Image: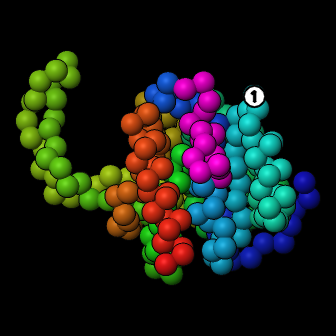
């Protein structure tokens, strides 16, 4: 693909190469259907119509047999081809995100100072208000940040065998990391490269890589119902939340 002109808008990377084994389903969780649309389509819809978003990059698995039909359906519904792009991901989430960053740099033509967001494919209940609050970080002069929700439950530390309580952890200053996570493209690329050269470090999100690189990552409080579909018990709640979200559009 030839490079296209870019602006100051944000590109969204949606890693969708995972299979979601904890869902105990033959269908990858991002392709399960609610209200006649896949979870991934609901997730993509969170960013459509947002002025600050220049485009969405979906990164699917090499053997993905679902994405092509969804992409055609989205394009047929009026989503612009330059706005929605896709490429193939890697074996691990970190590999997939890094491939997405390289794609945006090499194929789309983003420069290292432009902002990108990474958002879970199976997290379709993002609120527009929370998204806009996260995007405000671009004006702060900082390194970026993430949506997060403060821990409200009592937290217990288990013993080494994970069978007994060792002690109670203070929940003060503890947060659940959510997505999207917002950083400059070049800084996130550099952070991932550093982590990948250190086999002793395992990262579970983009903020982990930025922390490793010494960045100051901001916390932006978001709604706790911005949940990720992980196990079968999450599905009814996500269906309810999406129904409520749809109803609110018509109030």
Residue 155: tell me if it is visible. yes
Left or right placement of residue 101 versus residue 192 in this view? right
Image point 43% across, 34% down: which residue? Answer: 231
Q: Residue furthest top?
A: 161
Image point 76% across, 32% down: which residue? Answer: 65
Image point 76% across, 47% down: which residue? Answer: 70
x and y, in percent, of residue 219 in the image: 36, 65
Does the stretch in magenta take in 81?
A: no
Vertical side of 29 occupied by 98: above or below: below
Q: Quadrant of the N terminus?
A: bottom right
Vertical side of 235 occupied by 64: above or below: above
x and y, in percent, of residue 93 in the image: 57, 38
x and y, in percent, of residue 154 in the image: 13, 47
Left or right placement of residue 60 versus residue 131 in this view? right
Q: Residue furthest bottom?
A: 139
Residue 89: tell me if it is visible. no
Over which residues does the magenta segment extend?
25-41
Q: In the structure shown, which secondary structural element does the residue marked by tag 1 occupy?
A: loop
Image point 83% across, 50% down: which residue? Answer: 72
Does the stretch in magenta take in 31?
A: yes
Decide: few, some or many residues near mark 1? Use Cα within 10 Å; few <14, some 14-19, many ≥20: few
Q: How is the image coloured?
A: rainbow
Left or right placement of residue 142 versus residue 118 in this view? left
- Residue under label 1, please give it: 63
x and y, in percent, of residue 33 in the image: 60, 43
Foreground of the two, 117 or 58: 58
């Amino acid at each position: 693909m030839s490079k296209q002109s870019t602006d100051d808008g944000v590109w969204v990377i949606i890693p969708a190469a995972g299979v979601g084994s904890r869902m105990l389903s033959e269908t990858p969780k991002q392709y399960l259907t609610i209200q006649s649309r896949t979870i991934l389509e609901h997730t993509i819809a969170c960013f459509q119509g947002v002025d600050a978003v220049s485009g969405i990059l979906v990164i699917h698995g090499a053997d993905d047999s679902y994405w092509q039909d969804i992409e055609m359906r989205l394009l047929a519904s009026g989503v612009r081809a330059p706005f929605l792009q896709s490429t193939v991901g890697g074996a691990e989430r970190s590999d997939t995100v890094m491939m997405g960053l390289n794609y945006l740099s090499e194929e789309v033509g983003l420069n290292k100072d432009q902002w990108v967001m990474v958002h879970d494919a199976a997290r379709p209940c993002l609120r527009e208000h929370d998204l806009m609050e996260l995007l405000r970080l671009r004006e702060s002069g900082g390194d970026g940040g993430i949506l997060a929700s403060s821990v409200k439950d009592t937290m217990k530390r288990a013993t080494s065998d994970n069978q007994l309580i060792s002690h109670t952890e203070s929940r003060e200053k503890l947060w659940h990391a959510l997505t999207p996570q917002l950083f400059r493209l070049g800084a996130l690329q550099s952070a991932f490269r550093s982590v990948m050269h250190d086999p002793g470090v395992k990262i579970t999100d983009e903020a982990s890589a930025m922390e490793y690189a010494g960045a100051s990552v901001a916390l932006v409080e978001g709604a706790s119902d911005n949940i990720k579909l992980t196990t079968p018990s999450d599905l009814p709640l996500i269906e309810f939340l999406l129904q409520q979200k749809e109803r609110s559009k018509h109030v």
